[in-house]
Amino acid sequence: MVAFRTGFCIFASEKLENMIQELVRQRELLRLEYEYERAEFQRQTEAMGVGRKVRRGLCWFPLSVGRSYRNSLDQLVVEVVNTAPSDIEHQFEPGKPVCFFEQDGAELLHYMRFVAQVSYVEDNRMVVAMPSEDALSKIQNAERLGVQLYLDEYTYRQMFAALDQVIETKSGRLAELRDIFHTSAPTSKFTFAPVRFPWLNPSQEQAVNEVLWAKDVAVVHGPPGTGKTTTLVEAIYETLRRENQVLVCAQSNMAVDWISEKLADRGVPVLRIGNPSRVTDRMLGFTYERRFESHPRYTDLWTLRREIRHLYDNRKGSSDSFHQKIARLRDRCTELEYLIHEDLFAEARVIACTLTGSANRLLLGRRFGTLFIDEAAQALEAACWIAIQKADRVVLAGDHRQLPPTIKCPAALQGGLDKTLMQTIVEQKPHCVSLLTVQYRMSDGIMQFPNQEFYGGHLQSAPEVKYRSILDWDTAIDWIDTPDETEYAEQMADDGQSRQNPAEAELTLKTLKEYFEKIGRDRILYERLDVGIISPYRGQVSLLRRMLRRDSYWKPFRSFITINTIDGFQGQERDIIVISMVRSNQDGEVGFLRDLRRMNVAITRARMKLLLIGHRVTLARHPFYRRLLTYIDNLLDQW
């Protein structure tokens, strides 16, 4: 018996050591990614010319500076306009850090020593939150001004700190969750009768109950169109019958706002933590800052702060009585700030933020019975651990068969940095996974191919969508082959990084135009049929946008047509989806199209019609696209 226990302890110790080594390896991969991003930023800043930065969408130059003002959040903001507008798709987004520079007569760039933040961006106009009046003055006085994206180091610091904590912890709930996620350590469940949800389908109802039963971890695997958000909202709502407050996170602000809106629609009090400039207008009223300012005691606090400023502005000398009065007023301010803060958290049932945002000082010292992570398949494991440190159990929702996290460093990608915590748990604890099996988006002809390729044939189409189509006697998917002519060969895009195929772009719009004529222009306008044109390549997206704008045929339909990359269409759907594949070469090289999870996203955006434009010979060299072509051919034969 003693020998058995000794052997078991050695086995357990080895497994723990292997797990720690794996986490240490992951930290090293994260370091590679960070250093790669930093080196890229350094190269862009020092070596890359302004023209290349502009073509890559990293920079606007030259700028004109517009009005400056205090916004509703009391931030000092300034409007800047790109005076050399182009059709290039830029990468500026609300919340991203930026830096300003001035170009001298010798065309040398002089960077200003402050970092600002994008508050709003639309077309060639951007509103930027400035750190100080002095910073604003510098850009207002600059002659040849430009702005470029800046490296966001804060997120990396938080991820490194979280991984270090997970690696070093020896005991406690964090250590238990780490062992459960990464080893064969058993999970446990509550045992009570299942709750009935007649408004959900059986797989959704089962998923909600699995969440309620889980003591450690549960995974809701939601393929496209299966109602993952609906299921997650129901699980959160039902959890709040048993717990006073939960933490809800996601990788992106957009995903946090989406789930928060759905919860708010159910009447759940949500407190949104994070930079207000990154929050949608719909959720702005739920932010901590807005709630703080609307609190009944805020007027008293504002009056005290005004009195402190007045005392400083009118002081004569520096007496003890002055300092004592200031100290008393500040103590009172601190007391009021604490009271308001506690009131806001006491009223909220859901605290919502990004995974990085869970490190916000407002959440310091707070713990939650349950953490819900939405879009978990797009989050780096290190980012998940930032939030997990605050929770006793974890519920992850997403689809690891769709978009993975974006990794820029080839070595980090090859090393497996894109493997998410959700994937690890799916592999280690398959019994914790609930697959949603009924999809409500696609006609059956579109759904069946990704169903077989990615979901083991477990999905089924809801009766109301199974046979729907735009036209009678129409196939769900068509492949339009590009000719073997030289003019249809792929080429590098203007940014020097992406690819484009001008002839294929023309064929893409021509194909859509022909399909519009089949449907009837009046019917499209009356029924407001929406269209998504997708390409895996940013260069092709920019080209298609330019072509669409220049062709007067599309003018009545422009509000119904969206052109974007696959990543830009994540979480969206359209009646008609057109995919321009771009790749056409003699070597059968498909490049970026090898990422089959991205192609799964592209295909599953379509509700009723999917049109694929590409060079059959090139793409058929890859087994996945060969199977796709065979599937489409069989559909045509059946029709």
Image (cartoon, rainbow, N blue to C red):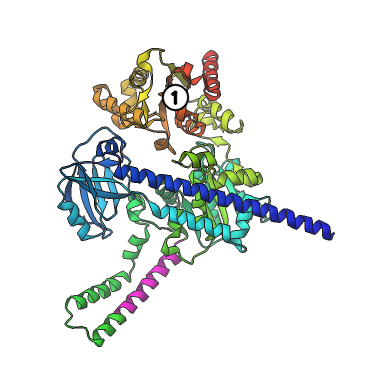
Tell whether position 334 is magenta: yes
Q: Residue at x 17, y 45 (%)?
A: 104
Left or right of 112 on screen, residue 296: right
- Amino acid carrying label 1: it is Lys
Q: Looking at the picture, how far across and down is residue 77, in whole percent?
A: 23, 54
Give coordinates of residue 110: x percent, y percent.
Answer: 22, 49
Q: Is residue 577 above or below residue 200?
A: above
Residue located at (47% from left, 54% from top):
159
Residue at the limit of the structure toward the right, as seen here? 1
Q: Residues within 10 Å of mark 1 (few under 14, many from 20)?
A: many
Left or right: residue 168 compared with residue 68: right
Query: Element at badge 1?
Result: strand
Image quadrant in which the N terminus is located: bottom right
The quadrant where residue 178 appears: bottom right
The answer to which of 578 and 231 lies nearer the viewer is 578
| Tally of numbered tags | 1
Which residue is drawn at the image coordinates 18% and 39% (left, top)? 83
Q: Is residue 205 at least partly visible in the picture?
A: no
Q: Is residue 515 left or right of residue 203?
A: left
- Residue 516: where, in percent of width, then height? 35, 20
Q: Which residue is mark 1?
A: 609
Residue visible at 27% across and 27% down?
546
Figure check: 432 above or below 70 = above
Using the image as rendered, state which of residue 360 and residue 467 is in the foreground.
360
**Who is closer to the viewer here, 60 or 268?**
60
Q: Locate residue 555 relative to residue 617 in the image: left or right.
A: left
Q: Which residues are magenta?
A: 329-348
Residue 386 makes an appearance in the image: yes
Q: State yes or no: residue 320 in magenta.
A: no
- Give the dominant element type of the magenta stretch: helix, strand or loop: helix
Residue 394 pos. (x, y %)? 56, 54
Can you tell which quarter of the image residue 539 is in?
A: top left
